[in-house]
């Protein structure tokens, strides 16, 4: 009897092992079609290989008179590649993984031709359950001892979402779904998958926390790496050491490499922590980079408050009555006068403030030089902030012990000095943590508390300086003239019009997944417009959004396109700035559809002709 369905993932990329993508694909296909190794595969396919893969799946020689061929979300199977690429191009997601090649293979005992129909039904049900919005082409092959089906899947769905698979996708989603459908259609499920799923009692987060704690304890009780490894093994860990360290406990079905636990748990970091664990804390210093700007009131004024009628002079009474008879409000007039005077005073005070900022940061009294100096000081602060954060990360294990002790200090005290027996566990835990700090790191709780507080206070101090320098920079910018002020506002307007950051924050904070397509035009460029498409997406297992920005010519020709999904947030923002610079797009008009955008361009053209 066979063991049921087997599943593996193989990533096929162009240039892997110094071979072309086609060569790697051919080698992979030869391997997975071996009758002794026929199993389920998920593999990456580059865009240039899609046609080859579709042709392979639809090879009539490997089917019985072409009867076992099917597709999903495809109108004409002969043009499957073209239809898949149309979806990708529409959503601007043509790079990276463009397709998944899924192979499901039955045991030899169940590979009779009479099971071909049910195998197709299984694949169709699987797609309907896991990837209902994705186009797919599938075909049953009958030329090996194991009846099997190939499914070619477009990674971009009709809803614009791109398939993202984390490390647990096979174990938690694909395997259970295939086993469920195997039972439905009378095929042998893979029992080993179910054993693994049952054995994996801990979530990925729980596994990481447990392994970090074990390594921390081992470091605290070791003088070298060998002693650390021995401690871990005596604690019940299976540990392998090579280029990396991998380890697992009895509750874990798979080992995890230590570098996946964080920067403090790479093999080199563990060695360094062992050798330096009893050393004094490394100190950091955030210097003062902000020059004190006093500011001063240039104009003093006394608010003109309208008196009560009984307190008015005869002249004031006559003036108030006269205004009332004219239908004017004497109270409002007084308010307007006060407001205008206050505005004038505040405006002059701001001018004086800017002058003081410029002369403080520039020896030549030059606003540009002052701005450059402020930017340099912010960079220096940024370097110092990174240093402090690096130390907080470096000493995180010791600080974590201190923070846990903080939480139970009162209860431990009440047990020891007020004889409250219900807090015995907290007292014992406190004693254990205190011993870990002293024996493992040579530190007292007071030392760790003082050090952690100092680092956090330095961060607060540094961030306050960054804020103050930013305010001083903005003050100069706002008085540099209309041109620069407009430039700044325009940049904000373009980012706001695209709306990616706002949509991403709404998804993260409130789980509001925005679907939005708009067309942006600018009075500064009548030859192009910008299409912005924002769609829900699942990124790293979390709900989010992806935004595709496409610059179109007036004639509808695509000039440039990029997507937030294919780059970091910093790179995406830089591309927006590049568009603003290259196409001169400043203040934007948001249009609901493409025709409205083109009409807006024509309107601007007519204005310029006049």
Image (cartoon, rainbow, N blue to C red):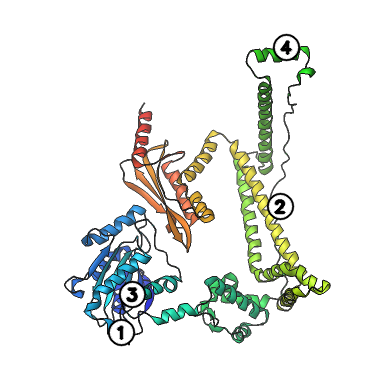
Element type at marker 2?
loop
Residue 45 shows up from this direction: no
Q: Decide: is 455 above or below 505.
A: below
Write the residue at 64% across / 75% down. 273
User: Which numbered tag is attached to residue 296?
Assistant: none
Q: How many residues crowd mark 3 within 10 Å: few (<14), some (14–19), many (20+)? A: few
Q: Which residue is mark 3?
A: 184
Relative to the observer, which residue lies in front, 157 or 495? Answer: 157
Q: CA distance from mark 3 to mark 1?
A: 25 Å
| Residue 484 percent coordinates (x, y) | 54, 38
Q: Which residue is mark 4?
A: 318
Q: Is residue 196 left or right of residue 454?
A: left
User: Which numbered tag is attached to residue 36?
Assistant: 1
| Sequence-first tag of 2 and 4 | 2
Answer yes or no: do the residues labelled 3 and 2 have beta carbons within 8 Å?
A: no
Foreground tag (2 vs 4): 4
Answer yes or no: do the residues labelled 1 and 4 have beta carbons within 8 Å?
A: no
| Residue 496 percent coordinates (x, y) | 49, 44
Q: Is residue 271 left or right of residue 521?
A: right
Element type at marker 4?
helix
Q: Which residue is mark 2?
A: 288
Q: Decide: is 201 above or below 297.
A: below
| Sequence-first tag of 3 and 4 | 3
């Amino acid at each position: 009897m066979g063991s049921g369905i087997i599943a593996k993932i193989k990533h096929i990329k162009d240039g892997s092992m110094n071979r072309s993508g086609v060569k790697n694909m051919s080698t992979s296909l030869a391997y997975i079609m071996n009758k002794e190794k026929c199993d389920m595969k998920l593999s990456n396919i580059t865009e240039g290989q899609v046609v080859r893969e579709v042709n392979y799946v639809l090879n009539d020689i490997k089917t019985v008179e072409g009867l076992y061929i099917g597709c999903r979300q495809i109108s004409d199977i002969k043009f499957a590649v073209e239809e898949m690429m149309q979806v990708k191009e529409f959503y601007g997601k043509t790079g990276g993984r463009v397709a998944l090649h899924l192979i499901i293979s039955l045991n030899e005992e169940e590979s009779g031709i009479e099971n071909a129909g049910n195998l197709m039904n299984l694949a169709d049900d699987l797609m309907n359950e896991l990837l209902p919005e994705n186009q797919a082409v599938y075909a049953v092959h009958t030329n090996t001892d194991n009846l099997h089906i190939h499914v070619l899947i477009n990674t971009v769905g009709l809803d614009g979402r791109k398939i993202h698979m984390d490390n647990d996708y096979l174990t938690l989603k694909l395997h259970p779904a295939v086993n469920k459908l195997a039972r439905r259609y009378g095929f042998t499920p893979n029992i080993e998958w179910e054993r693994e799923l049952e054995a994996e009692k801990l979530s990925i987060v729980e596994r990481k926390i447990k392994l970090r704690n074990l390594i921390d304890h081992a470091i605290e009780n070791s003088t070298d790496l060998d002693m650390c490894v021995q401690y871990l093994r005596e604690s019940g860990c299976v540990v392998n050491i090579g280029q990396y360290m991998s380890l697992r406990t009895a509750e874990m079905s798979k080992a995890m490499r230590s570098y996946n636990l964080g920067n403090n748990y790479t093999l080199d970091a563990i060695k360094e922590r062992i050798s330096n664990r009893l050393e004094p804390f490394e100190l950091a210093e955030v210097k003062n980079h902000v020059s004190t700007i006093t500011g001063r009131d240039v104009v003093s004024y006394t608010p003109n408050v309208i008196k009560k009628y009984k307190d008015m002079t005869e002249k004031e009474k006559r003036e108030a009555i006269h205004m009332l008879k004219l239908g004017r409000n004497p109270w409002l007039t007084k308010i307007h006068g006060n407001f205008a005077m206050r505005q004038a005073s505040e405006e002059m005070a701001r001018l004086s403030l800017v002058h003081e900022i410029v002369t403080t940061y520039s020896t030549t009294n030059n606003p540009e030089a002052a701005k450059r100096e402020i930017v340099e000081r912010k960079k220096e602060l940024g370097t110092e902030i990174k240093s402090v954060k690096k130390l907080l990360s470096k000493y995180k294990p010791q600080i974590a012990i201190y923070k846990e002790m903080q939480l139970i200090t009162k209860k431990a005290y009440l047990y020891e000095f007020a004889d409250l027996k219900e807090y015995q566990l907290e007292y014992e835990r406190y004693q254990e943590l205190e011993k870990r700090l002293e024996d493992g790191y040579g530190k007292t709780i007071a030392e760790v508390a003082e050090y952690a507080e100092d680092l956090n206070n330095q961060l607060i101090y540094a961030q306050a300086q960054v804020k103050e320098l930013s305010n001083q920079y903005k003050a100069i910018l706002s008085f540099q003239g209309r041109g620069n002020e407009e430039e700044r506002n325009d940049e904000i307007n373009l980012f706001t019009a695209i709306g990616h950051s706002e949509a991403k924050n709404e998804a993260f904070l409130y789980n509001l997944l925005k679907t939005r397509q708009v067309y942006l035009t600018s009075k500064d460029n009548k030859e192009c417009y910008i299409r912005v498409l924002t769609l829900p997406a699942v990124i790293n297992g979390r709900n989010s959004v992806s935004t595709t920005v496409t610059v179109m010519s007036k004639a509808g020709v695509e000039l440039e396109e990029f997507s937030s999904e294919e780059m970091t947030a910093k790179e995406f923002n830089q591309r927006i700035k590049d568009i603003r610079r290259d196409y001169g797009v400043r203040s934007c008009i948001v249009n609901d559809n493409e025709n409205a955008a083109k009409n807006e361009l024509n309107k601007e053209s007519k204005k310029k002709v006049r």
